[in-house]
Image (cartoon, rainbow, N blue to C red):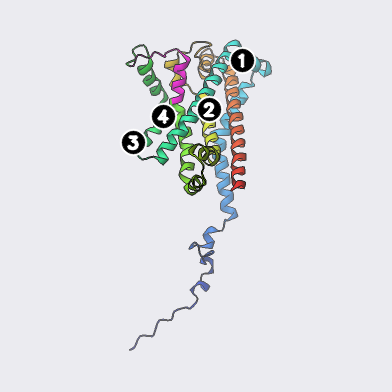
Amino acid sequence: MTPSPRVVDPNPEAIRPELTDDGGSGRSSRLLTPRHGSTSLRVGAATMWLSLIVLLPLAAILWQSAGGGFGAFWSAVSSPAAVASLRVTVTISIGVTIVNGFFGLLVAWVLTRDEFPGKRLVDAVIDLPFALPTIVASLVMLALYGPASPVGIHLQHTKWGVGIALLFVTLPFVVRSVQPVLLELDREVEEAAASLGANNFTILTKVILPALLPALLSGAGLAFSRAIGEFGSVVLIGGAVPGETEVSSQWIRTLIENDDKVGAAAISIVLLAISFVILFILRAIGARAAKREALAA
């Protein structure tokens, strides 16, 4: 018996219209179409997780700081020791952010644009402060710059020691924020500027830096926020000398040890407020810079 010929549907997409390609992209339009139910579920899960991990702890510390009323709050944040620790924290953190903003950009540039032996190793070392316990970083700094320094540099109980410790733990924030943007920059724009007679400095300031500014500001904001709240990496090298090397996180520990939880919560709220304001300002400036860059393009 002769087998019957196989009938081929000239229009197979008519059978499964939900799988029709969208614009020749090769993807199913059904997969690209958002569903209201699944979107609501994702938003709800993300909101719940954010509330449990971030919002509820923040609300708890805010409630605790207000436990003694505004008078107790103001007394805690305006005491001479609190003001001195805040001054030390903010001034050193600003200096650290500026230094790491420059050298973080330089390191990101080298890792992105240059080729040299051991490049992958250097790229991996950048993330070491993320993985290393901060108290270990403090021990490392103490071994290198302490009383038995093998290089003859003694920075224990000095602001320079605190600054170097903070530089160590905050450098990756700038590098990892700038590096992906550098990888995505269009090299043809730089080549076009060079062909028109622009020198390296002009290309850097007029072409590259405007495109990098949002990412650089974002990384700098994260570095500053980490610096003002850092404790472990400065606890040994700094020594908590009042008015000199005692940062706010160490003053908070002192208040907790003295059973002044309201005062510790009040200082924590001040640090949170400073961090939030700086991040908000830098993100706003970065967003405006990105918008100007998009309009110029």
Q: Are marks 1 and 2 in contact (CB under 8 Å)?
A: no
Mark 3 burial class by Cα count in 10 Å: few <14, some 14-19, many 20+: few
Let me know if residue 232 appears in the view: no
Distance, label 3 to label 1, CA atoms, is 47 Å
Q: Position of residue 268 (x, y in %)?
A: 57, 22
- Mark 1 residue type: Ala
Q: Residues within 10 Å of mark 1 (few under 14, many from 20)?
A: many
Q: Secondary structure at mark 3?
A: helix
**Amino acid bearing label 3:** Leu
| Mark 3 or 1, nearer chain start | 1
Q: Badge 4 is on which residue?
A: 129
Residue 76 - label: 1
- Residue at the far right: name it: 70
Mark 1 and mark 2: Cα distance apart in space: 23 Å
Comparing 113 with 32, the one in front is: 113
Callouts 3 and 4 close, C-beta under 8 Å: no
| Location of mark 3 (residue) | 121
Q: Residue 290's quadrant in the figure?
A: top right
Q: Considering only order in the chain, which callout, 2 or 1, is on the residue closer to the N terminus?
A: 1
Q: Give me the residue at 51% from left, 12% from top.
A: 244
Q: Which mark is residue 224?
A: 2
Coordinates of residue 139 in the picture (x, y in percent): 37, 19
Compare marks 2 and 4 and give the one earlier in the sequence. 4
N-terminal of the pair, mark 4 or mark 1, is 1
Q: Is residue 67 above or below residue 4?
A: above
